[in-house]
């Protein structure tokens, strides 16, 4: 009985959590699923480690995952006793979590408008720093059966094109590109996220899609044989996304947050980001 | 005529439950119901009632609701078409093969919907198992409303099969046997005896399947895509709105809750009236 306490204690803890949540339900609040991780870990750490260890929590756009994890590892190596924790997700979702009280030290978003919202909500202390930019690229399956070569090819009747929905940032970017090129793409599906678009192209369901250069690069790098190819187009510059990063007001360690910001903006950090396909801001 | 165990036990059980529910059961029971009630209430409280009507009647919202109702109806009919025969086969056969078939048919019930969507892609996708065959037949399933209906039928059918099979087993085969000895052909027995006796189970199963179709999200987004009026059902619209306009997402969620409550309420009402009519 004492050997396997975990399932029981999970059940008991969840039951207590639900019961207490209901008892204080009138107060509202609640960090949602995203906050769950961050509420558990600090307690675990404070009980098990000495005073010298510090934790830095970074909320970052999903597209930054690979590069930030790499930079985070370097940062931990350069700062003994420091643990960097990441929460990756859609930028607006991250800002919503922070508004509801999720504890974090740094926020990096995939566009400036989402960061503006965080600034307006009083979550951010300093002026956000733009650190990279990202542009759209046409993504096609490796065999490119529909023969897509240019942006105008996306308007071909027989081509099944998948875009992001206008409500999500990559969809808004796709619309600016269409406007700049003076074309009207009729997508067969408007997906919720870039990864959904890449997924539909990768599986061959769709003939082409519009996603960020970094997403194409990540997919190309993910398998032994690349399943997708990226095609550049001139109008992409009309929809360049600038990524800003900023320390958060509720940061537990402002100086450490500042040092991480430097690790992202300095030459080494930029090299990692550019390897992932990002361009200078 | 021997009475089935449930027939003798049922009246006593109902009488007892009125008298003797252990008091301490009430606390977890109340907490359990609060777990469902509080989030729904919280959602209702956050709705921007001033803008509720414009948010809910926007073109995108009505298109999604309409598509959801249409596809759920067609899918439910398909569930009946395949599900009734399946339930009868499962309820009237025993053995390893029947057990295996039951596990298979009920699988979508326990699978994460995304997994269902991936499986459907592997079968009906352009590069899927049947992709070329369907292509030859001139059927385009990818990104079409047909894909939505296939996804909904896939996830909802087990609900119908589960309740109908349960009902058929509870009724037993005595009346069918009698009808058969009196010379009724199998189809007549099925039509005049089997189905009428299992009607309450069939009705609640149908309504449950319809409700499941309305709520289908994972398999649809994985398999069918998301385009206004074609594949973007209400759950997909809610998920999308969450990104751009959270107030609209909450308002639409409440609409879906209202429709679901209506559907479940309908099950109870129909069940009660059928039970009353039967006794």
Image (cartoon, coloured by chain):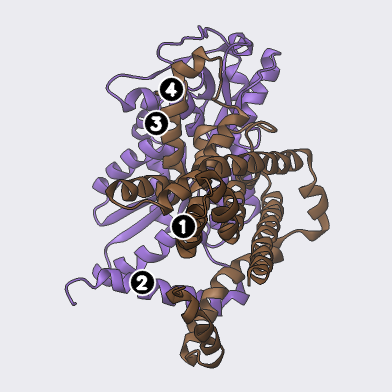
Chain colours: A purple, B brown
Distance Cα–Cα, label 4 vs label 2? 44 Å
Please tell me whether mark 2 sits on a helix, a strand or a loop.
Answer: helix
Rendering quarter of residue A178: top right
In the rendered image, which residue does mark 4 sit on?
Answer: B130
**Residue linked to disc 2:** A11
Number of callouts:
4
Q: Nearer the viewer, mark 2 or mark 3?
A: 2
Name the element at disc 1: helix
Count residues near mark 1 (Cα–Cα under 10 Å), then give few for <14, some for 14-19, many for 20+. Answer: some
Between the residue at mark 3 and the residue at mark 1, the CA separation in whole angstroms equals: 75 Å
* First along the sequence among labels 2 and 3: 2
User: Badge 3 is on which residue?
Assistant: A273
Real-space CA distance between mark 2 and mark 3, rounded to the nearest whole angstrom: 42 Å
Q: Where residue B47 appears, x then y in whole percent?
A: 72, 60
Q: Earlier in the sequence, mark 1 or mark 4?
A: 4
- The image shows residue A60 at horizontal and vertical percentages of 46, 44
Q: Are marks 4 and 2 in contact (CB under 8 Å)?
A: no
């Amino acid at each position: 009985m004492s050997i396997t306490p975990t399932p029981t204690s999970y059940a008991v803890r969840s039951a207590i959590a639900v019961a207490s949540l209901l008892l204080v339900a009138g107060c509202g609040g609640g960090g949602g699923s995203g906050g769950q991780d961050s509420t558990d870990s600090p307690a675990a750490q404070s009980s098990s480690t000495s005073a010298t260890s510090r934790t830095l929590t970074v909320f970052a756009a999903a597209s930054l995952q690979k590069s930030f994890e790499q930079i985070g590892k370097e940062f931990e190596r350069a700062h003994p006793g420091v643990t960097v924790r990441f929460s990756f997700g859609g930028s607006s979702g991250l800002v919503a979590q922070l508004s509801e009280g999720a504890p974090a030290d740094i926020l990096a978003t995939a566009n400036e408008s989402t960061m503006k919202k965080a600034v307006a909500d009083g979550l951010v202390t300093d002026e956000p720093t733009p650190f990279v930019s990202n542009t759209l690229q046409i993504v096609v399956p490796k065999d490119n059966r529909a023969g897509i070569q240019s942006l105008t090819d996306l308007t071909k009747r027989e081509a099944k094109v998948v875009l992001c929905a206008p409500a999500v940032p990559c969809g808004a970017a796709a619309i600016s590109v269409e406007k700049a090129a003076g074309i009207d793409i009729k997508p067969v599906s408007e997906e919720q996220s870039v990864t959904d678009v890449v997924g539909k192209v990768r599986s061959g369901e769709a003939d082409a899609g519009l996603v960020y250069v970094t997403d194409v690069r990540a997919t190309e790098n993910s398998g032994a044989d690349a399943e997708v190819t990226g095609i550049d187009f001139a109008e992409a510059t009309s929809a360049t996304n600038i990524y800003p990063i900023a320390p958060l007001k509720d940061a537990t360690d402002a100086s450490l947050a500042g040092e991480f910001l430097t690790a992202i903006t300095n030459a080494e950090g930029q090299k990692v980001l550019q390897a992932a396909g990002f361009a200078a801001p | 005529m021997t009475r089935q165990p449930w027939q003798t036990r049922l009246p006593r059980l109902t009488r007892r439950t009125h008298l003797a529910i252990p008091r301490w059961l009430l606390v977890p029971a109340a907490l359990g119901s609060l777990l469902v009630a509080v989030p729904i209430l919280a959602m209702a409280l956050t709705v921007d009632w001033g803008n509720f009507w414009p948010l809910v009647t926007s073109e995108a919202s009505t298109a999604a609701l309409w598509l959801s109702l249409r596809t759920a109806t067609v899918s439910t009919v398909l569930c009946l078409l395949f599900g009734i025969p399946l339930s009868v086969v499962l309820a009237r056969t025993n053995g390893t093969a029947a057990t295996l078939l039951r596990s298979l048919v009920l699988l979508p019930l326990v699978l994460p919907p995304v997994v269902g969507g991936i499986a459907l892609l592997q079968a009906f996708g352009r590069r899927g198992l049947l992709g070329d065959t369907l292509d030859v037949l001139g059927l385009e399933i990818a990104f079409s409303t047909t894909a939505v209906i296939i996804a909904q039928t896939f996830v909802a059918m087990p609900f119908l099969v589960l309740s109908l099979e349960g009902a058929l087993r509870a009724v037993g085969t005595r009346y069918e046997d009698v009808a058969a000895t009196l010379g009724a052909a199998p189809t007549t027995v099925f039509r005049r005896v089997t189905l009428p006796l299992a009607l309450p189970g069939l009705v609640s199963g149908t309504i449950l399947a319809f409700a499941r179709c309305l709520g289908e999200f994972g398999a649809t987004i994985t398999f069918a895509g998301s385009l206004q009026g074609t594949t973007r059902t209400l759950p997909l619209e809610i998920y999308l709105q969450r990104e751009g306009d959270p107030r609209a997402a909450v308002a639409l969620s409440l609409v879906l809750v209202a429709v679901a409550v209506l559907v479940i309420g309908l099950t109870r009402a129909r069940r009660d009236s059928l039970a009353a009519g039967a006794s």
